[in-house]
Amino acid sequence: MRRSLEDAAVSAARLSRRALLASSALALVPLLSSGAALAATPGDKIRKIGLLCAAQASDPQEFQAAQLIAAAWRQLGLDVEVKGLPRPQLSDVVWNNRTKWDMTMWRMIGRPERSDPDEFAYNLYNPSTIATGYNFVGYDNPEFQKLAEAQRAEPDPEKRRALMYQAQDMISRDQPYLFLVYPKNVLAYDKNVWKPSSIVEQSGIGIRCFWTFLRAEPVGAKRDMICNAAESLIALNPLYISGAIDSWVTELIWDRLMRVGPDGLPQPWAAESMTQVDPVTIDVKLRPGQTWHDGKPVTVDDVVFSFEAPATTDKSPMYKPFVANIASVKATDDQTVRFVLNTPSAAFATSTLAKINLTPKHVWAPILAGLEGKPQNAETVQEERPIGSGPFKVSRFKLGEEIVLEANAQHWEKPKMDRWIMRVITNTGAALGMLPRGEINFLSDYRGDPKLLADLAKANPNVEVVSTTDMGFRFAAPNIRRPPFNDPRFRQALSMAINRQLMVSAAWNGFAAPANSFVSSALPFWNKPGIDEVKPDMAAAKKLLEEAGYQLVRGKLHYPEGVRETLAEG
Amino acid sequence: MPYLAKRLLHMVFVLWAVATIVFLMFRLMPGDPTAAFIDPTFTVDQQRAIRAQFGLDLPLPQQYLVYLGNLLRGEFGLSFRQRQPVLGLVLEVLPNTLLLTMTSLVIAYIFGTLLGALMAWKRGGVFEAVSVPLVLTTRAAPEFWLGMVMLAIFAFGLGWLPSGGANSAGASYGSEWNRVFSLDYLSHLALPALTLAIYLQGLPALLMRSSMLEVMREEFVTMARMKGLSERSIMLRHAARNALLPLVTAFALGFGQSVGGNVVVENVFSWPGLGRLLADAIANSDYPLAQCAFLLIAFVLVLMNFLADLAYGLLDPRVAHERGA
C-alpha cells in the first residue's frame, strides 16, 4: 500500500517538473486538491455512496438516470455505486430498513386525488411518519410542518397558494428530495373511431381519464371503446384500493360526490352542491333522481353508509385514512348530508369527497354484517356483478382477461359510447401493433419507449398520440439520518450537480419535464412559477461544498475538519 | 399390486418434498413479502392486523404445520393481492393452459415423429443434412423471439390472425364450451399453439430419429428385408412402430413440463393461462398463489410420469415382466 502510494507520488511528480521543484514530499497535495490547499486538515474521506434504483430491465429510464447522477457526483469527488434491485426488494430496503441505505431513486405517482397538493405537502415530510410512514428520508423540519398544517386550514385559495409557494421554496432550499423530472404519459387513440374534440386531457393525468371515457364521441358505426391494460386486474371492489388499473375501472362503476375535473380542481358530481357552513362543517346536497345499477334509488342513507363503512369498521382498511378526519356524518334531510371534521381541511373535497365510492347500503351492509368477528375484511369479497351508480355498469369481467362495461342509460350524464372494454395485453409490442389493426382503439396503458409510439403515429395517420406531464415525480431520495446527507448544503450541492435537461433527453427520450418541486408543473394553479428552472452548475456545487468545509484530497471528497466517517462498510 | 402401491407412495413423497421446498423457497427469499401488498400509509397496527390475517406473524415451523394441514384439507389459502381463494384463481385459467398445451403437443408430436422417422429413413442424404440443423435451430431459438417473429408475420404483416388474448374484444358466448369451440377462440389459439409447437417438435423429431436408427439395426428389420417387403412397409409398419416407445415417455413428461412452462408464450400472446398467473404471482410476491400454481404443476408432472410408467408396461411386455407383474 505504502509502496504504491510512493510510486504514484513519483509518477505524478514526474508529470510536473514545477511540482517536483517545489517540494517532492508534498507534491501531491497542491497538485490534486482544488485550490483549498491552505484549509484546515480535512475530516475522514466520505465512504462509497450507494445509489439504489430499480433493476435496469424493470425500469430502464430510472436506471439510466441513476447512472447520469452517479457520473455527475463522481466529478465532485465522491465514490458512487449504482445498485439496481428488483422493485419488491427495493421497497423492502427503503421502507423497512430505514438506517441501511444512503440514497435511492424513488417516485411518487399521480392520482386524481393528488390534484390537490395537500397530500404530498402534508404527508411526505411529516415528522410523525419518519419511523414507519411516508417520510422515509427522515426530514424533520417543524417550520415546514407548520406551513403544511397552515395551508390545510386555509379556506381561501389565494392565501393557501401563497403558503404553498413558501413551502415549495423551503423544500427547494433544504432539498430533502432531489427532484429530477415530472414524467410525461404517452397514450394514443384511433381518430377514425373517436372524435379528437371529444377526448379530454385531464391535467396531470392525461387522456386516460374519467372525462374521456364519459364524453368520447364515436365518429362512425364503431361505438365500443376498446382499451388495453398491461397487467391483470386485481379486484373490482368499492372498498378495496387494489391497484392502479383497477382504479380506472372502479371510478367508472362507482360514482363519487365530487369529481376532480379536467382542470385538476374538484367539482360537484353526485352532489348537486357543496356548502362550507363553517371551517369544520360541510353540507352536501345530493343530486336527485339517481339510481343504483339494480334500479334502487340512491339515498342519503347510502351516502352516510359509504363514509361510515371505512370509518367505523376495520373492514376497509385502505380507505380508512381518507375518512380519518371526519368526526361525524349525518343526513339532515332526505337530500342533505352534513360532514363535521376534526380539523379544518381545505383539501377535503378532493381528497375525501372525490375519493370515496358511493356504495349501496342494501348490498354492502349485509356483507359487512356477515364479516363481523371474522378475520376477513371487505377486500376478500368479489361481487359477481358489482353494483354502483356510476355512468357505466358491469356487463361481465374476467380479471386476467377482459372487463366489459356498458353505458348506464339511467345516468344523468349518459356516456356517448355503447360499451367500454378493457383487454389485458401483457405484451407491450403487441398492444402497439393492435392499435392500427383495430384490435384496440384506445391505447390506455403504454409502458414502452415513447419514441416507438411516435414512429407508429407517423406511419399511421389515424393514430393520434397525446403526451401529458404527470402530477407524479421522480426523485433521488437522500437518507437524511446518515451523514453526510444530514447536511442541507451537501444535499444542495448534489442537486446542483445534476443536469436535469440532459436526463430528460438521455433517460426519458424527451418525454419528461425537469422538476424541482413536490407540486408538479402539471398543476399550474399550485406550482410556483420558475421553481423548476434549475440550471446544472458543477462549479457552484464545488464552491458550495468548499464553503461548507468539505475538502478534496487527491481528488476524493472528505468531510469537514474533525468529522469522522462512522458508516463506512467493512 | 405391490409395484403400484410402491409407485403411489413414491408419488406422495415427491409431492410432499415439492410442497416443502415451495414453502421454504418463498419465505427465505430476500425482501419482506408483505412490503409488496401492504400500503406504506398503513399504521403499524393495520400492518400487524394484515400479517395476522395471512398467518405471517407466526413462527416459521408453526406456519409450516398450518400450511401442511391446510394442504391436506385442500385449502390453499387466500391470494395476497386478489384476496380470493387461490385454488379458484388457478382453476379458472387452467382450461386455457391445458388447451394450449394439448394442441401444441399433439401438433409437435405428430409432426416431430414423422419428421424423425423420415430423417432416419433418408439417412445421409441432403434431406437429413438440412433438417437436422434446422430442428436444432428451432429448439435453440428463444421462445420470446420466435413468438415476436410469428406475431410480426402472421398478425401485423399478413393480418391473418389476431395478436393476443383469447377472444375478440367484447365477444360473448353462452357457455364455456361454446366459447372454447368458437372460431374466434381457436383463431386466437393458433399463434401461441403454433409457436409452442415449433419449439416443442425438436425433441420428438430427434428422439424418433435416433430410436429409429437403433431399431433399423435389429434383426427383425433384416428379416423383413429378406422376406422381400417393400422399404415403405418395413419403415412404417415395422421400424417406426417399434421406435415409438421412448416417445410415449417424452410426451407424458413434455405435457407435465409445458403445463407450467408456458410462461413466455402466454406473456407474448397475452394468453390468460397458468404460466402468466404464476409469473404475476411471483413478481408480486403473492406466495399463496404461486405455491398453489407450483403444486398443481408438480402434481401434473408427477401424475404424467406415473401414467407414462404404466403405459410403458402395457406397451412393452418386457418392462412388465421385469417388474414382476
Image: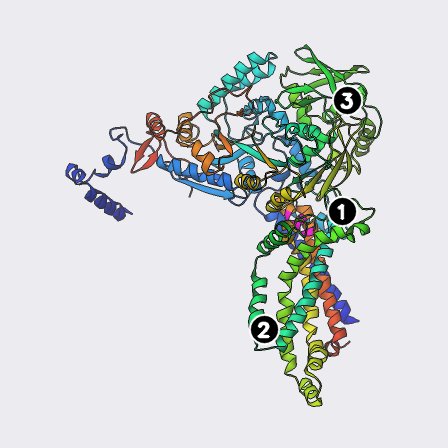
> What kind of element bears circle 2?
helix
The stretch in magenta equals B274-279
The first of marks 1 and 2 along the sequence is 1
Residue B238 against residue B87 in the figure, above or below? below
Q: Which residue is under mark 3?
A: A303
Q: Is residue A3 left or right of residue A513?
A: left
Chain where mark 3 sits: A
Residue B275 on the magenta span: yes
Residue A220 against residue B150 in the figure, above or below? above
Q: Which residue is under mark 1?
A: B88
Question: Where does the image place residue A139, in percent across and percent down from the top left?
Answer: 50, 26
> What kind of element bears circle 3?
helix
Q: Nearer the viewer, mark 1 or mark 2?
A: 2
Q: Which residue is under mark 2?
A: B127
Q: Is residue A30 left or right of residue B35?
A: left
Characterize the magenta stretch by its predominant secondary structure: helix
- Res B219 visible: yes
| Mark 3 and mark 2 residues within 8 Å of each other at the beta carbon | no
Chain where mark 1 sits: B
